[in-house]
Amino acid sequence: MAEKSYKDLKSEVWDAGLCARCGACVAVCPADALSFSPGSPDHPSSSGYCKMENDGILCGACYRVCPRVEGGAVPSALLGDYLSVIAAKATFSVPGKQSGGAVTAILAYALDAGLIDAVVTVSEDHWTKKPFSAVITKREALVTQAGSRYNWWVPMLAALKEAVVVRKCRRVAVVAVPCAAEAVARMRASDFDLLAPYRKAVRLLIGLFCTESFDYGKLMEGKIRGELGIDPWEITRLDVKGKLEITMADGRVADIPLKDLQACIPAGCLRCTDFAAVAADISAGAVGSPQGYTTLLVRTPTGRGFVEGALVSGLLEAGGEVDLAKVESLATKKLARGRQG
Ligand SMILES: Cc1cc2nc3c(=O)[nH]c(=O)nc-3n(C[C@H](O)[C@H](O)[C@H](O)COP(=O)(O)OP(=O)(O)OC[C@H]3O[C@@H](n4cnc5c(N)ncnc54)[C@H](O)[C@@H]3O)c2cc1C
Ligand code: SF4
Ligand code: SF4
Protein backbone atom coordinates (compact mmCIF):
# COMPACT_ATOMS: atom_id res chain seq x y z
CA MET A 1 0.00 0.00 0.00
CA ALA A 2 1.23 3.51 -0.79
CA GLU A 3 2.37 5.30 2.32
CA LYS A 4 -0.66 7.13 3.63
CA SER A 5 -1.16 8.80 6.96
CA TYR A 6 -4.00 10.33 8.91
CA LYS A 7 -3.66 13.37 6.64
CA ASP A 8 -4.92 11.28 3.72
CA LEU A 9 -7.71 9.93 5.90
CA LYS A 10 -8.63 13.49 6.73
CA SER A 11 -8.78 14.68 3.13
CA GLU A 12 -10.38 11.54 1.63
CA VAL A 13 -12.81 10.59 4.40
CA TRP A 14 -13.27 13.12 7.22
CA ASP A 15 -13.47 16.24 5.07
CA ALA A 16 -15.48 14.42 2.40
CA GLY A 17 -18.29 13.62 4.87
CA LEU A 18 -17.75 9.88 4.41
CA CYS A 19 -16.71 8.86 7.92
CA ALA A 20 -18.81 5.99 9.28
CA ARG A 21 -17.65 6.80 12.84
CA CYS A 22 -16.66 3.17 13.30
CA GLY A 23 -13.68 4.17 15.44
CA ALA A 24 -11.31 1.65 13.85
CA CYS A 25 -8.66 4.27 13.13
CA VAL A 26 -8.85 5.47 16.73
CA ALA A 27 -8.47 1.90 18.00
CA VAL A 28 -5.42 0.97 15.94
CA CYS A 29 -3.41 4.22 16.04
CA PRO A 30 -0.25 3.08 17.88
CA ALA A 31 0.38 6.62 19.10
CA ASP A 32 -3.15 7.08 20.50
CA ALA A 33 -3.21 10.29 18.51
CA LEU A 34 -6.72 10.01 17.08
CA SER A 35 -9.89 10.62 19.05
CA PHE A 36 -13.46 11.79 18.76
CA SER A 37 -14.10 15.09 20.47
CA PRO A 38 -17.58 15.48 22.02
CA GLY A 39 -18.13 18.75 20.16
CA SER A 40 -17.34 17.28 16.74
CA PRO A 41 -18.49 13.66 16.62
CA ASP A 42 -18.86 13.34 12.82
CA HIS A 43 -15.29 12.16 12.42
CA PRO A 44 -12.17 11.74 14.54
CA SER A 45 -9.50 14.40 14.87
CA SER A 46 -5.76 14.18 15.37
CA SER A 47 -3.68 15.45 18.26
CA GLY A 48 -1.20 16.55 15.59
CA TYR A 49 1.39 13.91 16.42
CA CYS A 50 1.81 11.10 13.88
CA LYS A 51 4.55 8.44 13.73
CA MET A 52 4.75 8.81 9.98
CA GLU A 53 4.41 12.55 9.59
CA ASN A 54 6.60 13.47 12.58
CA ASP A 55 9.13 10.66 12.89
CA GLY A 56 9.17 9.17 9.38
CA ILE A 57 8.23 5.71 10.71
CA LEU A 58 6.15 3.61 8.30
CA CYS A 59 2.64 3.45 9.75
CA GLY A 60 -0.68 4.52 8.26
CA ALA A 61 -2.47 1.91 10.41
CA CYS A 62 -5.48 4.25 10.52
CA TYR A 63 -5.72 4.48 6.75
CA ARG A 64 -5.25 0.76 6.24
CA VAL A 65 -8.30 -0.19 8.33
CA CYS A 66 -10.73 2.53 7.28
CA PRO A 67 -13.80 1.01 5.62
CA ARG A 68 -14.36 4.18 3.63
CA VAL A 69 -11.20 4.07 1.54
CA GLU A 70 -10.64 1.83 -1.48
CA GLY A 71 -9.14 -1.56 -0.75
CA GLY A 72 -11.72 -3.88 0.79
CA ALA A 73 -12.91 -7.08 -0.85
CA VAL A 74 -15.60 -6.31 -3.41
CA PRO A 75 -18.71 -8.44 -2.76
CA SER A 76 -19.71 -10.66 -5.66
CA ALA A 77 -23.42 -10.26 -4.96
CA LEU A 78 -25.80 -7.91 -3.16
CA LEU A 79 -25.75 -9.98 0.05
CA GLY A 80 -22.11 -11.04 -0.36
CA ASP A 81 -20.91 -14.64 -0.39
CA TYR A 82 -22.37 -17.14 2.04
CA LEU A 83 -22.30 -20.90 2.59
CA SER A 84 -25.76 -21.28 4.10
CA VAL A 85 -28.67 -19.32 5.50
CA ILE A 86 -30.78 -20.34 8.48
CA ALA A 87 -33.39 -18.95 10.85
CA ALA A 88 -32.28 -19.67 14.40
CA LYS A 89 -32.98 -18.78 18.02
CA ALA A 90 -31.50 -19.21 21.48
CA THR A 91 -32.96 -22.10 23.46
CA PHE A 92 -32.39 -20.36 26.80
CA SER A 93 -33.94 -17.20 28.19
CA VAL A 94 -32.50 -13.99 26.71
CA PRO A 95 -35.02 -11.37 27.89
CA GLY A 96 -33.48 -8.44 26.00
CA LYS A 97 -32.85 -10.26 22.73
CA GLN A 98 -33.54 -8.22 19.63
CA SER A 99 -34.69 -11.01 17.32
CA GLY A 100 -34.18 -14.68 18.21
CA GLY A 101 -31.22 -14.19 20.53
CA ALA A 102 -29.11 -16.26 18.11
CA VAL A 103 -26.14 -13.91 18.35
CA THR A 104 -26.13 -14.22 22.14
CA ALA A 105 -26.48 -18.01 21.87
CA ILE A 106 -23.50 -18.38 19.50
CA LEU A 107 -21.34 -16.18 21.71
CA ALA A 108 -22.46 -17.95 24.91
CA TYR A 109 -21.56 -21.30 23.36
CA ALA A 110 -18.15 -19.97 22.29
CA LEU A 111 -17.38 -18.58 25.77
CA ASP A 112 -18.64 -21.71 27.56
CA ALA A 113 -16.61 -23.97 25.28
CA GLY A 114 -13.46 -21.87 25.78
CA LEU A 115 -13.26 -21.07 22.06
CA ILE A 116 -13.10 -17.35 22.76
CA ASP A 117 -11.99 -15.43 25.82
CA ALA A 118 -13.68 -12.11 25.09
CA VAL A 119 -16.45 -10.48 23.08
CA VAL A 120 -15.99 -6.93 21.81
CA THR A 121 -19.40 -5.41 21.30
CA VAL A 122 -21.53 -2.33 21.87
CA SER A 123 -23.27 -2.38 25.24
CA GLU A 124 -25.42 0.29 26.83
CA ASP A 125 -26.05 1.94 30.16
CA HIS A 126 -29.58 0.64 30.76
CA TRP A 127 -30.49 3.84 32.64
CA THR A 128 -29.45 6.43 30.04
CA LYS A 129 -29.53 4.05 27.04
CA LYS A 130 -26.19 5.51 26.07
CA PRO A 131 -24.13 2.95 24.15
CA PHE A 132 -20.48 2.23 24.78
CA SER A 133 -17.82 -0.03 23.39
CA ALA A 134 -17.30 -2.97 25.74
CA VAL A 135 -15.30 -6.13 26.37
CA ILE A 136 -17.50 -8.94 27.72
CA THR A 137 -16.04 -12.15 29.14
CA LYS A 138 -19.00 -13.74 30.97
CA ARG A 139 -22.20 -15.32 29.67
CA GLU A 140 -24.32 -13.47 32.27
CA ALA A 141 -23.11 -10.10 30.97
CA LEU A 142 -23.80 -11.17 27.39
CA VAL A 143 -27.38 -12.00 28.30
CA THR A 144 -27.99 -8.71 30.13
CA GLN A 145 -26.51 -6.80 27.19
CA ALA A 146 -28.46 -8.59 24.43
CA GLY A 147 -30.46 -6.38 22.06
CA SER A 148 -29.59 -3.79 19.44
CA ARG A 149 -28.16 -0.36 20.07
CA TYR A 150 -29.64 1.85 17.39
CA ASN A 151 -28.18 4.86 19.17
CA TRP A 152 -24.74 5.70 17.99
CA TRP A 153 -21.79 6.67 20.08
CA VAL A 154 -18.10 6.73 19.38
CA PRO A 155 -15.57 5.30 19.11
CA MET A 156 -17.42 2.03 18.64
CA LEU A 157 -14.33 -0.16 18.30
CA ALA A 158 -12.45 1.38 21.24
CA ALA A 159 -12.86 -1.81 23.24
CA LEU A 160 -10.99 -3.75 20.59
CA LYS A 161 -7.83 -1.98 21.66
CA GLU A 162 -8.67 -2.67 25.29
CA ALA A 163 -9.21 -6.38 24.59
CA VAL A 164 -6.18 -6.93 22.35
CA VAL A 165 -3.57 -4.46 23.59
CA VAL A 166 -4.46 -3.82 27.23
CA ARG A 167 -5.99 -7.12 28.37
CA LYS A 168 -4.02 -9.18 25.84
CA CYS A 169 -6.97 -11.40 24.94
CA ARG A 170 -5.93 -13.75 22.17
CA ARG A 171 -9.27 -15.28 21.12
CA VAL A 172 -11.67 -12.46 20.52
CA ALA A 173 -15.13 -12.38 18.93
CA VAL A 174 -16.30 -9.02 17.58
CA VAL A 175 -19.94 -8.06 17.04
CA ALA A 176 -20.23 -5.13 14.67
CA VAL A 177 -22.47 -3.24 12.29
CA PRO A 178 -21.30 -3.47 8.66
CA CYS A 179 -18.95 -0.46 8.67
CA ALA A 180 -17.09 -1.68 11.75
CA ALA A 181 -17.17 -5.27 10.46
CA GLU A 182 -15.45 -4.14 7.26
CA ALA A 183 -12.78 -2.35 9.33
CA VAL A 184 -12.15 -5.48 11.41
CA ALA A 185 -12.00 -7.57 8.22
CA ARG A 186 -9.28 -5.23 6.94
CA MET A 187 -7.32 -5.74 10.16
CA ARG A 188 -7.58 -9.50 9.70
CA ALA A 189 -6.52 -9.36 6.05
CA SER A 190 -3.60 -6.96 6.52
CA ASP A 191 0.00 -8.18 6.62
CA PHE A 192 1.14 -4.89 8.17
CA ASP A 193 3.18 -5.50 11.34
CA LEU A 194 1.44 -2.90 13.49
CA LEU A 195 -1.91 -4.57 12.83
CA ALA A 196 -0.62 -8.09 13.59
CA PRO A 197 -1.98 -8.19 17.18
CA TYR A 198 -5.50 -7.60 15.81
CA ARG A 199 -5.05 -10.03 12.94
CA LYS A 200 -3.97 -12.75 15.34
CA ALA A 201 -6.54 -12.05 18.05
CA VAL A 202 -9.83 -11.78 16.15
CA ARG A 203 -11.17 -15.30 15.86
CA LEU A 204 -14.81 -14.62 15.00
CA LEU A 205 -16.52 -11.65 13.38
CA ILE A 206 -20.32 -11.41 13.66
CA GLY A 207 -21.88 -8.64 11.56
CA LEU A 208 -25.35 -7.22 12.16
CA PHE A 209 -27.62 -6.21 9.29
CA CYS A 210 -27.90 -2.44 9.34
CA THR A 211 -30.02 0.13 7.54
CA GLU A 212 -28.79 3.04 9.64
CA SER A 213 -28.02 4.15 13.15
CA PHE A 214 -29.11 7.31 14.95
CA ASP A 215 -27.10 9.95 16.73
CA TYR A 216 -27.63 9.41 20.49
CA GLY A 217 -28.03 13.10 21.32
CA LYS A 218 -30.45 13.83 18.49
CA LEU A 219 -32.56 10.68 18.97
CA MET A 220 -32.60 10.03 22.70
CA GLU A 221 -32.24 13.54 24.08
CA GLY A 222 -33.84 15.43 21.19
CA LYS A 223 -36.70 13.32 19.83
CA ILE A 224 -37.55 10.79 22.54
CA ARG A 225 -36.96 12.84 25.67
CA GLY A 226 -37.37 16.34 24.27
CA GLU A 227 -40.36 15.89 21.97
CA LEU A 228 -42.14 12.79 23.38
CA GLY A 229 -41.30 13.39 27.05
CA ILE A 230 -40.10 9.80 27.53
CA ASP A 231 -37.13 9.34 29.85
CA PRO A 232 -34.54 6.79 28.72
CA TRP A 233 -34.92 4.68 31.88
CA GLU A 234 -38.61 4.16 31.10
CA ILE A 235 -37.71 2.38 27.86
CA THR A 236 -37.43 -1.39 27.79
CA ARG A 237 -37.08 -1.88 24.05
CA LEU A 238 -36.36 0.03 20.88
CA ASP A 239 -37.12 -1.60 17.54
CA VAL A 240 -37.16 -0.42 13.94
CA LYS A 241 -39.96 -1.98 11.91
CA GLY A 242 -40.92 0.54 9.25
CA LYS A 243 -40.99 3.04 12.15
CA LEU A 244 -39.12 3.39 15.43
CA GLU A 245 -41.10 1.59 18.14
CA ILE A 246 -40.46 2.55 21.75
CA THR A 247 -41.77 0.11 24.37
CA MET A 248 -41.91 1.25 27.99
CA ALA A 249 -41.80 -0.66 31.26
CA ASP A 250 -45.46 0.16 32.04
CA GLY A 251 -46.58 -1.37 28.72
CA ARG A 252 -47.04 1.86 26.77
CA VAL A 253 -45.76 1.85 23.18
CA ALA A 254 -44.90 5.01 21.24
CA ASP A 255 -43.62 5.27 17.72
CA ILE A 256 -41.88 7.73 15.44
CA PRO A 257 -42.15 7.53 11.63
CA LEU A 258 -38.74 7.00 10.05
CA LYS A 259 -39.20 10.09 7.88
CA ASP A 260 -39.17 12.17 11.08
CA LEU A 261 -35.81 10.67 12.05
CA GLN A 262 -33.86 11.63 8.93
CA ALA A 263 -32.05 14.44 10.75
CA CYS A 264 -30.88 11.96 13.42
CA ILE A 265 -29.00 9.79 10.91
CA PRO A 266 -25.27 10.56 10.76
CA ALA A 267 -24.01 11.71 7.36
CA GLY A 268 -21.68 8.70 7.10
CA CYS A 269 -24.65 6.31 7.34
CA LEU A 270 -26.41 8.01 4.45
CA ARG A 271 -23.38 7.24 2.25
CA CYS A 272 -23.19 3.61 3.41
CA THR A 273 -24.05 0.81 0.94
CA ASP A 274 -23.51 -2.39 2.96
CA PHE A 275 -26.69 -3.74 4.57
CA ALA A 276 -25.71 -7.36 5.18
CA ALA A 277 -22.22 -7.00 6.70
CA VAL A 278 -20.62 -8.82 3.80
CA ALA A 279 -17.17 -8.99 5.43
CA ALA A 280 -18.26 -10.96 8.51
CA ASP A 281 -17.99 -14.69 9.28
CA ILE A 282 -21.68 -14.71 10.20
CA SER A 283 -24.21 -11.96 9.48
CA ALA A 284 -27.33 -11.66 11.63
CA GLY A 285 -30.55 -9.74 11.19
CA ALA A 286 -34.25 -9.71 11.91
CA VAL A 287 -35.64 -9.42 8.40
CA GLY A 288 -36.51 -12.60 6.50
CA SER A 289 -37.11 -14.90 9.48
CA PRO A 290 -40.31 -15.76 11.34
CA GLN A 291 -41.02 -13.70 14.48
CA GLY A 292 -38.78 -14.82 17.33
CA TYR A 293 -35.95 -16.01 15.07
CA THR A 294 -32.75 -14.44 13.78
CA THR A 295 -31.69 -14.68 10.14
CA LEU A 296 -28.11 -15.99 9.96
CA LEU A 297 -26.02 -15.81 6.81
CA VAL A 298 -23.12 -18.18 7.47
CA ARG A 299 -20.33 -16.89 5.25
CA THR A 300 -17.06 -18.62 6.10
CA PRO A 301 -15.83 -21.99 7.40
CA THR A 302 -15.07 -20.21 10.68
CA GLY A 303 -18.65 -18.98 10.89
CA ARG A 304 -19.93 -22.44 10.06
CA GLY A 305 -17.79 -23.96 12.83
CA PHE A 306 -19.27 -21.65 15.45
CA VAL A 307 -22.88 -22.04 14.27
CA GLU A 308 -22.65 -25.83 14.03
CA GLY A 309 -21.01 -25.99 17.46
CA ALA A 310 -23.78 -23.85 18.96
CA LEU A 311 -26.45 -26.05 17.35
CA VAL A 312 -24.81 -29.25 18.63
CA SER A 313 -24.44 -27.75 22.11
CA GLY A 314 -28.19 -27.22 22.20
CA LEU A 315 -27.90 -23.48 22.95
CA LEU A 316 -28.98 -22.59 19.40
CA GLU A 317 -31.94 -24.07 17.55
CA ALA A 318 -32.73 -23.77 13.84
CA GLY A 319 -36.29 -23.53 12.54
CA GLY A 320 -38.46 -21.93 9.89
CA GLU A 321 -37.70 -20.70 6.39
CA VAL A 322 -35.76 -17.56 5.55
CA ASP A 323 -37.34 -15.29 2.94
CA LEU A 324 -34.20 -13.97 1.27
CA ALA A 325 -36.19 -11.69 -1.02
CA LYS A 326 -37.01 -9.55 2.02
CA VAL A 327 -33.34 -9.30 2.96
CA GLU A 328 -32.44 -8.40 -0.63
CA SER A 329 -35.14 -5.75 -0.74
CA LEU A 330 -33.66 -3.87 2.24
CA ALA A 331 -30.15 -4.33 0.85
CA THR A 332 -31.22 -2.92 -2.52
CA LYS A 333 -32.80 0.13 -0.90
CA LYS A 334 -29.68 0.82 1.15
CA LEU A 335 -27.42 0.45 -1.86
CA ALA A 336 -29.51 2.93 -3.84
CA ARG A 337 -29.55 5.47 -0.99
CA GLY A 338 -25.82 5.14 -0.40
CA ARG A 339 -25.02 5.65 -4.08
CA GLN A 340 -27.20 8.76 -4.21
CA GLY A 341 -25.21 10.14 -1.29
C1 LIG B 1 -27.79 -0.01 14.32
C2 LIG B 1 -28.46 -1.32 13.94
C3 LIG B 1 -29.32 -1.35 12.84
C4 LIG B 1 -29.93 -2.56 12.46
N1 LIG B 1 -30.76 -2.56 11.37
C5 LIG B 1 -31.35 -3.72 11.00
C6 LIG B 1 -32.24 -3.74 9.88
O1 LIG B 1 -32.47 -2.71 9.24
N2 LIG B 1 -32.81 -4.92 9.53
C7 LIG B 1 -32.54 -6.09 10.22
O2 LIG B 1 -33.09 -7.14 9.87
N3 LIG B 1 -31.72 -6.11 11.28
C8 LIG B 1 -31.11 -4.96 11.69
N4 LIG B 1 -30.27 -4.94 12.76
C9 LIG B 1 -29.94 -6.24 13.43
C10 LIG B 1 -30.99 -6.66 14.45
O3 LIG B 1 -31.44 -5.54 15.19
C11 LIG B 1 -30.38 -7.69 15.45
O4 LIG B 1 -29.17 -7.19 15.97
C12 LIG B 1 -30.09 -9.03 14.81
O5 LIG B 1 -31.28 -9.53 14.23
C13 LIG B 1 -29.55 -10.05 15.82
O6 LIG B 1 -30.58 -10.34 16.72
P1 LIG B 1 -30.35 -11.38 17.91
O7 LIG B 1 -31.60 -11.45 18.70
O8 LIG B 1 -29.78 -12.65 17.35
O9 LIG B 1 -29.19 -10.64 18.72
P2 LIG B 1 -29.02 -10.51 20.34
O10 LIG B 1 -28.98 -11.95 20.85
O11 LIG B 1 -30.04 -9.61 20.84
O12 LIG B 1 -27.58 -9.95 20.44
C14 LIG B 1 -27.25 -8.72 19.84
C15 LIG B 1 -25.76 -8.52 19.99
O13 LIG B 1 -25.40 -7.37 19.25
C16 LIG B 1 -24.62 -6.49 20.06
N5 LIG B 1 -24.91 -5.13 19.60
C17 LIG B 1 -26.03 -4.41 19.80
N6 LIG B 1 -25.95 -3.23 19.19
C18 LIG B 1 -24.75 -3.20 18.59
C19 LIG B 1 -24.10 -2.23 17.77
N7 LIG B 1 -24.64 -1.05 17.50
N8 LIG B 1 -22.87 -2.52 17.30
C20 LIG B 1 -22.28 -3.71 17.61
N9 LIG B 1 -22.86 -4.67 18.37
C21 LIG B 1 -24.08 -4.40 18.85
C22 LIG B 1 -25.08 -6.77 21.48
O14 LIG B 1 -24.07 -6.44 22.40
C23 LIG B 1 -25.32 -8.28 21.41
O15 LIG B 1 -24.13 -8.99 21.63
C24 LIG B 1 -29.67 -3.75 13.20
C25 LIG B 1 -28.83 -3.70 14.32
C26 LIG B 1 -28.23 -2.51 14.69
C27 LIG B 1 -27.31 -2.48 15.89
S1 SF4 C 1 -14.81 5.44 8.91
FE1 SF4 C 1 -13.91 4.59 10.80
S2 SF4 C 1 -11.75 4.22 10.30
FE2 SF4 C 1 -12.57 5.59 8.71
S3 SF4 C 1 -12.08 7.65 9.44
FE3 SF4 C 1 -14.15 7.19 10.16
S4 SF4 C 1 -13.86 6.35 12.24
FE4 SF4 C 1 -11.86 6.28 11.21
S1 SF4 D 1 -25.56 2.53 8.11
FE1 SF4 D 1 -24.87 1.07 9.65
S2 SF4 D 1 -23.08 0.11 8.71
FE2 SF4 D 1 -23.45 1.95 7.56
S3 SF4 D 1 -22.21 3.55 8.49
FE3 SF4 D 1 -24.21 3.62 9.52
S4 SF4 D 1 -23.99 2.28 11.29
FE4 SF4 D 1 -22.29 1.81 9.90
Image (cartoon, rainbow, N blue to C red):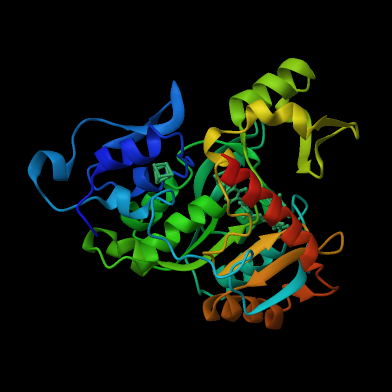
Q: Give the vertical position of 121 relative to 193 (above or below).
A: above
Residue 46 % position (x, y): 28, 32
Q: Is residue 217 above or below residue 309?
A: above
Q: Quadrant of the C terminus?
A: top right
Q: Is residue 179 visible?
A: yes
How many numbered tags mark residues here? 0
In front here: 88 or 127?
88
- Compared to 100, does 87 lie above or below? below
Q: Which image quarter is the N terminus in? A: bottom left
Identify the residue at the far left of this view.
55
Q: Position of residue 58 (x, y in %)?
A: 15, 53
- Seen at 47% across and 66% down, the residue is 117
User: In the figure, residue 200 lies in which quadrant?
Assistant: bottom left
The residue lying at 25 percent from left, 63 percent from top is: 192
Q: Closest to the observer: 138 or 302? A: 302
* Left or right of 121, for residue 238: right
Residue 142 lies, in percent from the top left, at: 62, 56
Report x, y in % for residue 339. 57, 46
